[in-house]
């Protein structure tokens, strides 16, 4: 007996529910009507469908490369940093080179964090004079800032021309997620940075030009940042201990955006930034308590 194994109650009696092929002729129009109604329901978008995440990014789309801060992101075009572009990061003076390096590292780490399925590393190209003045990269320190050694490739060059060529070739290969070019930006003219910008756009990967001093000429950088170390906010469990890295960052140029200046803190555990709105208050507090210490990268 070829009956659908469903049971239904009709007028208080329990009987087998016949399949469509066994339905009485009189009930077929009703069944056709029900089928059409069910089909419309199945092909209709659910009433409570999730089409947008709280962050404003549709599910399945990559998160934007930005700071995740309402006080900074509106200054950027479309609220994000362009991935296929050159971004210039320089210290407020030559002594602030480590601060510029730390800020660039935080941006690169955040880029990797929003692309969890991308196994490609960051390539950090360094110019020999930079290593002489500020030393080699310290793997334990990099790891503490959120970038593990397996996601970082480093190389050092004696000539800036060789460094720029390597950065271009790495981008063309598609083997790296981003390139950090740690060098004297003043030797980069408009032509050199234009080549980098075009290659970065084709690769869809950013180039972070890091230097201890601003360039003396025009470049093709999409954004231009000036960075200096700022007092860190002590951790809540020990106000005498150094806090997380903090910088005073100034956006001096941004195509399609607007300039601004902020004090921000980098949280390595969550790969996120926060505005250091209490830095000035903490600084005053430390001055009144000589036993307390502050630290900055």
Image (cartoon, rainbow, N blue to C red):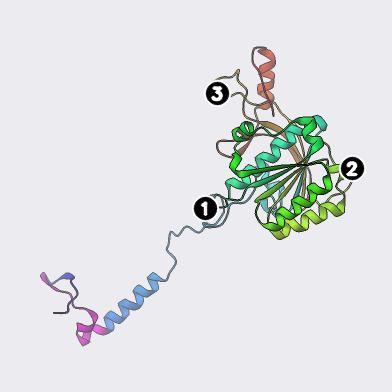
Instruction: Find residue 68 and report its horizontal and vertical position in percent.
Output: 61, 44
Q: In this view, does 96 lie to the left or right of 151?
A: right
Name the front one of labels 1 and 3: 3
Which residue extends farthest left?
13
Q: Can residue 223 be seen in this view?
A: yes
Q: Identify the disc placed on residue 236.
A: 3
278 is higher (above) or lower (below) than 250: above
Q: In this view, does 193 lie to the left or right of 208?
A: right
Residue labelled with disc 2: 216
Name the front one of labels 1 and 2: 2
Residue at x 65% of width, y 22% of height? 282
Closer to the chain start, of discs 1 and 2, is 1
Q: Which of 258 and 297 is in front in this view?
A: 297
How many residues crowd around disc 1 within 10 Å: few (fewer than 14), some, or many (20 or more)? few
Q: Nearer the viewer, residue 165 or 222?
A: 165
Instruction: Find residue 256 and report its horizontal and vertical position in percent.
Output: 76, 53
Q: Is residue 50 left or right of residue 120?
A: left
Question: Per the image, is 134 magenta?
Answer: no
Residue labelled with disc 1: 53
Report how far apart the C-alphas of labels 1 and 3 lie in the structure: 32 Å
Q: Give the range drawn in magenta.
A: 12-28
Q: In which quarter of the image is residue 195?
A: bottom right
Q: What element carries label 2?
A: loop
Which residue extends farthest right?
216
Residue at x 72% of width, y 42% of height? 155
Which quadrant would the N terminus be assigned to in this image? bottom left
């Amino acid at each position: 007996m070829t009956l659908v194994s469903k049971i239904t109650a009709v007028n208080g009696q329990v009987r087998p529910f016949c399949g469509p092929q066994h339905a009485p002729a009189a009930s077929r129009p009703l069944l056709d009507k029900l089928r059409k109604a069910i089909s419309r329901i199945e092909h209709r978008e659910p009433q409570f469908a999730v089409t947008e995440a709280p962050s404003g990014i549709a599910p399945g789309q990559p998160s934007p490369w930005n700071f995740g801060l309402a006080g900074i992101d509106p200054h950027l075009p479309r609220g994000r940093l362009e991935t296929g572009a050159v971004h210039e990061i320089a210290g407020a003076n030559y002594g602030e080179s480590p601060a510029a390096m730390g800020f660039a590292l935080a941006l690169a780490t955040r880029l990797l964090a929003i692309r969890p399925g991308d196994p490609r590393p960051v390539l950090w190209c360094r110019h020999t004079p930079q290593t002489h003045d500020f030393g080699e990269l310290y793997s334990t320190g990099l790891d503490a800032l959120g970038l593990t050694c397996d996601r970082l490739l480093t190389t050092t060059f004696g000539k800036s021309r060789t460094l720029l060529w390597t950065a271009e070739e790495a981008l063309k290969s598609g083997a790296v997620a981003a390139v950090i070019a740690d060098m004297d930006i003043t030797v980069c003219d408009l032509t050199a940075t234009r080549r980098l910008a075009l290659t970065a756009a084709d690769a869809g990967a950013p180039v972070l030009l890091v230097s201890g001093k601003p360039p003396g000429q025009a470049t093709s950088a999409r954004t231009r940042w000036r960075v200096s170390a700022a007092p860190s906010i002590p951790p809540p469990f020990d106000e005498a201990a150094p806090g997380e890295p903090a910088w005073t960052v100034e956006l001096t140029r941004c195509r399609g955006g607007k300039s601004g200046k902020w004090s921000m803190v980098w949280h390595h555990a969550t790969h996120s930034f926060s505005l250091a709105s209490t830095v000035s208050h903490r600084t005053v507090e430390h001055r009144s308590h000589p036993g307390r210490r502050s630290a900055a990268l």
